[in-house]
Amino acid sequence: MKCKKIRDIILSDYTDGELSSDRQKLIEDHLKGCPACREFLEELTGGIVTPLRESGHVKPPAEVWNRIERAIGEKEKSGAGETLLDWIKARAELPVLRRKPAFVLATILVAFLLAGGITARYFSERRGVNTYIEEQFDFLDSLANGNGDSYEDNGFSLDYFLL
Amino acid sequence: MKQIPKETILRASRGDMEAFKEIYDISSGFVYTVVYRIVRNSEDAQEVTQDVFMSIYQKINTFRFKSSLKTWLYRIATNRAINMYRKRAKEKGRKVTFEDNIKYDSDVFNKTAVNFEREHAEKLVKAMLGSLPCEQRACIVLKDIEGLRYQEIAEVLGIKINTVRSRLKRAREKLLALKETGESSHEM
Ligand SMILES: [Zn+2]
């Protein structure tokens, strides 16, 4: 293999321990005979990967937990819990909503119609509707995540519709 | 990382505050680290971390044990951090680029700075992460700081393994190139 190809592998799979033992051995054999690639590896490991690996975890300040505890306490006290609108807003963070807002709005509409159509009892107990729609969202989200990058194409949010 | 016992998750999902605190104690270190390394300032990192745990508190009863809680936590934390970073970048009315960070911190790339005093090491890490675009930075954080496997990173970010691989590769190429520029400009 050429040095260029070897270095491509060093930059990812080799450094990250993702190679099969055969492929790993192939790279190591090359390194034994190639000082230039050895130097490349040392620079990558010593100059870049090791400092990142050694940087370790940063602990959040204690106030963070205090604020969480307080926020939860307030939420519980206010009692009523989330409204359906809160619930939809919370789901507006799902990546699928950013990517395909029209599709999702249509789905929400259909979900409501279905939920209403199946039985009126669902509407008398909001929780049931929520769970049902939640499952649909999980499903949509899993579909959306199956096809490619989540972060490349956003710039649109359902928040604009709901606020 | 210490594992979060299933029983603790179940208790937390019934609203047990003590169990929820246990989950926080085990996971807040890595959640905060991932968020902090992506958003790159502690104020936003605290806000996002709080938001992440509030969201977990509210949704933990929908957790189905299909993936690990750890993956779920990484996923929420990374997504929220990226969103916060983007929001801030938008507010500034421009993309936070690469060059901005380099001008600011270029001297930490020189060799004496890499001589591993803690402070310099931290400066170097900040400068490196700051010179990467957000998507590449998230991958580097999950890989080099958190030690996740490609498969796990792909799940956390909702991208293909090959995308993980190419982002890591491009990120490291960029960091190597920067390091070289830093070193040569220092020698001049
Ligand atoms: Zn070579």
Image (cartoon, grey):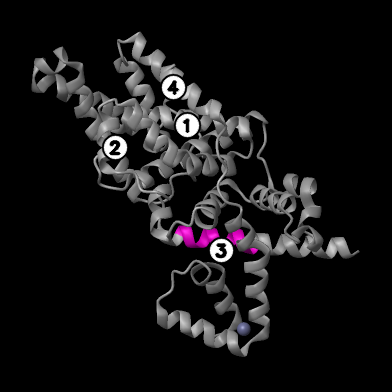
Q: Which mark is residue B169?
A: 3
Quarter of image, ligand 1: bottom right
Q: CA distance from mark 1 to mark 3?
A: 29 Å
Label 1 sits on a secondary structure element that is loop
In the image, what residue type sits under mark 2? Ile
In the image, what residue type sits under mark 4? Glu
Of callouts 1 and 4, the N-terminal one: 4
Q: Which residue is mark 2?
A: B9
* Residue A102 sits inside the magenta stretch: no
Q: Range of the magenta residues? A: B163-173
Whether labels 1 and 4 belong to a single chain: the reply is: yes
Q: Which mark is residue A156?
A: 1
- In this figure, what is the number of numbered marks? 4
Label 4 sits on a secondary structure element that is helix
Q: Position of residue A69 (x, y in %)?
A: 44, 22
Q: Is residue A24 above or below residue A46?
A: below
Q: Which residue: 48% across, 85% down?
A: A26
Point out the frontmost of discs 1 and 2: 2
